[in-house]
Image (spheres, rainbow, N blue to C red):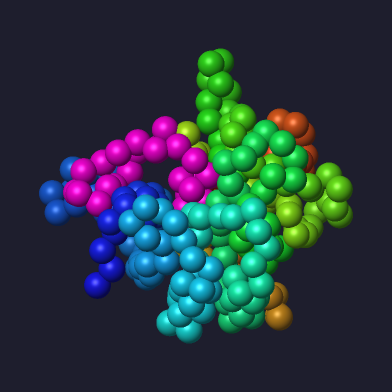
Amino acid sequence: KCDDKNGHGTHVAGIVAADAGADKLGLYGVAPSAKVFAYKVCGANGSCYADDIAVGIRTAADAGANIVNMSFGTDKDIPLIRDAVNYASSKDVLLVAAAGNDGPFSDSIDYPAAYAPVIAVGAVGKLSSGALAVTEWSSRGINLLTKLGEINDRDIEFAATGESIESTWNNGSYVILSGTSMASPFVAGLAAKYWQSPLVENITPAWATRDFLRSLTLDLPPPLEDNDSGFGLPQVPQVP
């Protein structure tokens, strides 16, 4: 049993896997057929502890989870969490995390999103013109200071919708929230929906899926890979 006393986790999980409820009149998540492994690593006030996070990541990896979404962050590089991330990555788990809400300054990305094995996701909103743009408060990476075309520590990889997102709440209702916490599960859900079988020897399903998501990206300004949105906004594949 894993009671959500805060609501944040329920909101994030709904973005991935909400199934419209028993009457099928509610909201659908990105991947409503996904199986959710729920691990409680934060208290009712939203504060999280490194040892709980590390155990949660390792437990998910050992339980056979394909994807771990982490809609939380800290300014500190914590070895306990870094080791757990590396452990899960070694077991072919695709890790996705919120970049943080500390923008618009460069190199403001939070951990664990800042680790290279983790897909770091910033947040996109709409301008008054209707155009999509990374929100001012979304944390930025250092992509322009590292090798372009690959992900290194403290790089942003993608951006996804993170402004005014309606999703499930812990009392059975829906609420609207904003943050990179909301953007991260859109990418995790897309990865779950289009989990890839590797077509090349020595490429694991997690890496094949990560590459596939890159192939789906819509470039956002500024052009090409950048500190704000990395490779861009992953899109649902177009069907001919």
Q: Percent from the top left, x then y, of residue 217?
A: 64, 45
Q: Which residue is the extreme one toward the left? A: 23
Query: Which residue does the image show at 42% across and 66% down from the upper left?
Result: 41
Using the rendered image of the protein, determine whether residue 118 is visible from the camera's viewpoint. Answer: yes
Using the rendered image of the protein, determine whether residue 213 is visible from the camera's viewpoint. Answer: no
Question: What segment is highlighted magenta in the picture?
Answer: 164-189
Q: Percent from the top left, x then y, of residue 44?
A: 33, 56
Residue 221 colored magenta? no
**Left or right of 116 on screen, residue 62:** left
Query: Which residue does the image show at 65% across and 59% down from the upper left?
Result: 76
The answer to which of 213 and 150 lies nearer the viewer is: 150
Q: Which residue is the extreme one toward the top? A: 129
Residue 172 colored magenta? yes
Query: Which residue does the image show at 68% across and 63% down from the upper left?
Result: 77
Query: Which residue does the image show at 49% across and 41% down from the upper left?
Result: 179
**Left or right of 146 on screen, residue 12:** left
